[in-house]
Image (tube, helix red, strand yellow):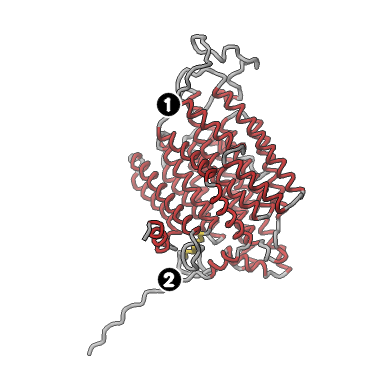
Amino acid sequence: MEPVQLLDRLLDFSMPHLVAVPILVPLLTAALMLLLGENRRRAKSALSVVSGLVGLLAALALLRWVNAPDTGDGPGSIGVYLPGNWRAPFGIVLVADRLSTMMVALTGVVAFAASIYSTSRWDRAGVHFHPLLQLQLMGLNGAFLTGDLFNLFVFFEVMLAASYGLLLHGSGRLRVQAGLHYIAINLAASSLFLIGAALLYGVTGTLNMADLSVRIAELAPADRGLVHAAAAILATAFFAKAGAWPLNFWLVPAYSAAVSPVGAVFALLTKLGIYTLLRLWTLLFAPDAGASAAFGQSALIAIGLATLFAGAMGIVGTQRLSNLAGFSVLVSAGTLLAAIGLGEPAVWAGALYYLLSSTLAVSAFFLLIDMIERWRNAGMSVAPHEAAGNAPFLAEDLRVLDDVNLDDEAQALYGRAIPAGVAFLGLSFIACTLLLAGLPPFSGFVGKFAMLSGAFVTSGTSTPAWIFLALLIASGFLALIALSRTGIRHFWTQPHPTMPALPALEVLPVAGLLAACVALTVWAGPVMRHALITAEGLRTPTAYRGAVFNAQQVPNPVAPKKATAP
């Protein structure tokens, strides 16, 4: 038997229990870390990295299983796990399809890189960093895999509770101030989540996502307005979590205040909001949902375009590196929301590809910013001149300094060899610029081109498609201006008295995330095929419903009969 066939046999044998592994591994790891205590930080760091690797391998195994050739009862099916051994819709279900496993795999890549990076220095800036990180991963993976709306709320709260502690990690007035805003907006969004879920349950009598998609199509006309109101309330909560305008005032200050590995993981939080909107909208308001089909589509497009415009204006109007990363998150969120609202599988496929690329690029950018700021500020991780809003290459009266191209001995800097550390930072910054601006030849351009191609092939010359095209090109151009300006300011306009000291634990995660973006470009064909099949499944969720309703309970063990006396 060939190794690939053996692997598929092992994956088939481990299903459906493998679906629960991305949730159980971080949960058990966090519990073990709390037992170790704070005096065993090296052991906790090593345990965090090992747990991240195990979770990543489990996610990749699930991704391979759902993409393997479908034989009817093995790989290629949708994996459904019944934790309480109750059939849907009465029990909680975990569902591993192409969309959820892709998101879990993306979470595993980013979390593994962030956990390695944090072991260099940031995990020692406060207490319980690694347990909080593991609990956040548990919440993220659970939210991606759950098939029940109330269970989604539970995993959301687990993730948010951990994120509160992670945002405050490292202390400081700036983090406390941003943390208060972050907590307030998320508590409000969670309240809306509960209200919307309660309304849905009151009308339909279920919170199972697959069952909801069936019952909404059968609603009486008198109840349809309540369901639409509940969906609007739920959408408001998810828009706040996704960073959609005008509910995104908290995002840039919070993400900028967080320490770099936390900021890299936080790039996943907005994608969770977008994932939830995509999942629920395509299930509850599918084409076969009767009068509710495509409910709220125009609102999705409008909010997405407004978010894209706000992010583009913000990215060109800021000079802080960390703010650039935060506004880049808003640009990607607006792009994805508008693409979802266009309602075409071809556009969704490009959007899913772009989601992977933008998340990896922004996560790498957050980690890279920390290294650049520490180098430019003699070991400090916050740039004093940027906090004050002053450009480092200008005098107090905003005149350009005359000696910016001279070193301490008044010798010209041109023509000198570039040290390896500076070269790594500069090349990585250029790569992030190309990815975030969506320029060729990297994956950001491929994703944007795929979205635009799908929009104009399927939607023709519709007004939303043209506005989307204009904003997508304009946002990329403005991002290029802002990032190029920042690169010139940090690498060209001021002499550097010291060379950057780059530990391998910091270089490898950044290089790995950028290499993943390169891999997306090289293997764009297979990834895009996966995205297109995923989008087609979202458009017609019949297979999702069938997999959930047909999941079989495990039979109870039969007690052996007692031998009777002769």
Q: Which x, y percent locates residue 109?
A: 47, 45
Give the residue furthest to the front. Answer: 2
SS label for mark 2: loop
Q: Residue at x 65, y 15 (%)?
A: 399
Compared across the picture, whether 192 is left or right of 407 comes to: right
Give the residue furthest to the left. Answer: 566
Closer to the camera, 352 or 45? 352
SS label for mark 1: loop
Closer to the camera, 503 or 518? 518
Compared across the picture, whether 15 is left or right of 474 comes to: left
Dot placed on the residue nearer the N-terminal end, 2 or 1: 1
Q: Which x, y percent locates residue 56?
A: 44, 49
Q: Residue at x 31, y 79 (%)?
A: 560
Label total for image = 2
The N terminus - image quarter: bottom left
Work out how far the residue at label 2 is from the one at label 1, CA to CA, in angstroms. Answer: 56 Å
Q: Amino acid at mark 1?
A: Ala
User: To which quarter of the image does residue 305 belong?
Assistant: top right
Q: Which residue is mark 2?
A: 554
Q: Which x, y percent locates residue 522?
A: 52, 44
Give the residue furthest to the top. Answer: 410
Residue 485 visible in rendering: yes
Q: Which residue is mark 1?
A: 501
The C terminus - image quarter: bottom left
Residue 167 visible in rendering: no
How crowded pointer 1 is (Cα within 10 Å; few <14, some 14-19, many 20+) is rated as few
**Residue 139 sits above or below residue 16 on the image:** above
Q: Nearer the viewer, mark 2 or mark 1?
A: 1
